Image: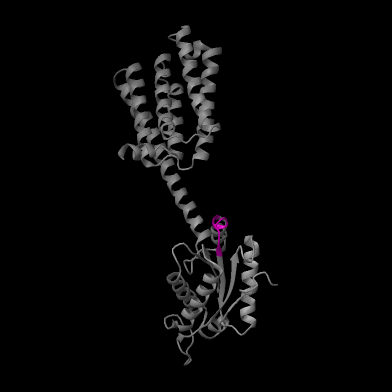
Amino acid sequence: MTSVYVLGAFVPRNPAVARQVLFALTVAATGVTLVFSVLAPRTLFPANQSAGVTGTCVAVCLFLLALACDLRFRRRDAVWAWAAFPFLAVAAITGLDLLSADASVAAQVFFLLPVLYAGAQLHYVGVACVSAAVTAGVTIVNVALGSGWTAIANTCFVAATLAVTAGALAVGGRRTDLLIAQLEKQATVDPLTGLFTRRALDRAAELNQSTDELGLLVLDLDNFKKVNDVHGHLAGDAVLQQLSALLTDLSRHTDAIARMGGDEIAMLLPGCSLDAAYAIADEVLRAIRSHRFDVSMSTMTRSHAPTVLRLTASVGVAHLPTHSDTLAGLYAVADAGLYEAKAGGRDQVGGLSRKDPHAA
């Protein structure tokens, strides 16, 4: 379990973006290295210009480029590949710096690339591990090629700069993730009632469209406008919150309840037969009819109007595949049923005839 957790720390927060970032950084680094190692080997390897050294450099670059291409284009999500790549990159940079006998800033600047990738794409544990590996690589290069306090100073300056960069990117990435999660929640959860939004209900309906049966109830409170007019909008909000809690208590764990707008609420009932959908609608009406909506803490009126309200609702029922085989058709049938219930005197269930579900 520990090994799985540790390896999981190297799986990027957003694999699709990480593939592009990793590929771009690898192409840039290997491209520059290959050009200089082939066209100007004396520049890259002033202390060792042998064909073997140049061949090793080319082989390492091509291997990293091939692995980056594999992740980018074949879209592999193997944990070992994500975990191995940044450490292979650090090892390659360290080895090439040692081969070139170059501890200059120009040589060590490539250590910034795995830091940029880790800080921008990995979780905190992954960032810390890659940063530690980069620090080790920087230390090896400076100690092996430098001397005395100069090597120590170079190691400290480069390692500290890279660590700060990694930390800043990691913190920024974490804040971005939290912001995205908050925005996604706002897009799927109604802030007043805690119910789903229409967008989330549509998504749930699409996921359940392939089921054998799917019920849909659309309801709203009768004369809800009077609650706002007499008691104020805060009282209306309190009523909606209590109604949402009531419907949640009545629902199954597989059901999805959404606030469509105003006081209109929809209940999606997966695996529910037509008769069961009507039975649930009747149960919802009875529960609302018998519930006492307490608006005493939010009423704005100073009159003697009661602060415990008795309300009723109207419900429209639709069923897939009985009434329609599309989501749009299902919503249309439920809305028509709701209109029928309102026109028929309210506090009732409306819908296409149970005996003739395809009747207009």
* Vertical relation: 17 (above or below) 135: below
The image shows residue 356, relative to residue 185, as above or below, that is: below
Q: How many numbered marks, from 0 up?
A: 0
The residue closer to the viewer here, 230 or 210, is: 210
Q: Position of residue 120 (x, y in %)?
A: 46, 39
Up/down of 16 relative to 275, above or below = above
Taking the view exactly as shown, the residue that stands out farthest to the right is: 360
In this rendered view, identify the residue nearer to me: 243 or 175: 243
Residue 239 percent location from the top left of the image: 48, 78
In the rendered structure, which segment of residues is drawn in magenta?
207-214
- Indicate left or right for 52 with 348 as reference: left
Name the spot of residue 61 as percent of width and height, x first.
49, 20
Examine the image and state in which quarter residue 152 appears: top left
Q: Is residue 98 above or below residue 249?
A: above
Residue 160 visible to an observer of this rendering: no
Percent across and percent down for residue 13 are 45, 43
Residue at left offset 55%, top offset 17%: 35
Let me know if residue 19 is in the magenta part.
Answer: no
Residue at image coords 51%, 24%: 66
Nearer to us in this view, 23 or 261: 261
Location of the C terminus by quadrant is: bottom right
Furthest residue toward top? 50
Instruction: Point out the residue furthest to the front here.
Output: 355
Residue sitting farthest toward the bottom: 304
Q: Main secondary structure of the magenta part?
A: loop
Q: Residue at x 49, y 39 (%)?
A: 15
Q: How is the image coloured?
A: one colour
Quarter of the figure that contains the N terminus? top left
Q: Mark yes or no: residue 210 visible.
A: yes
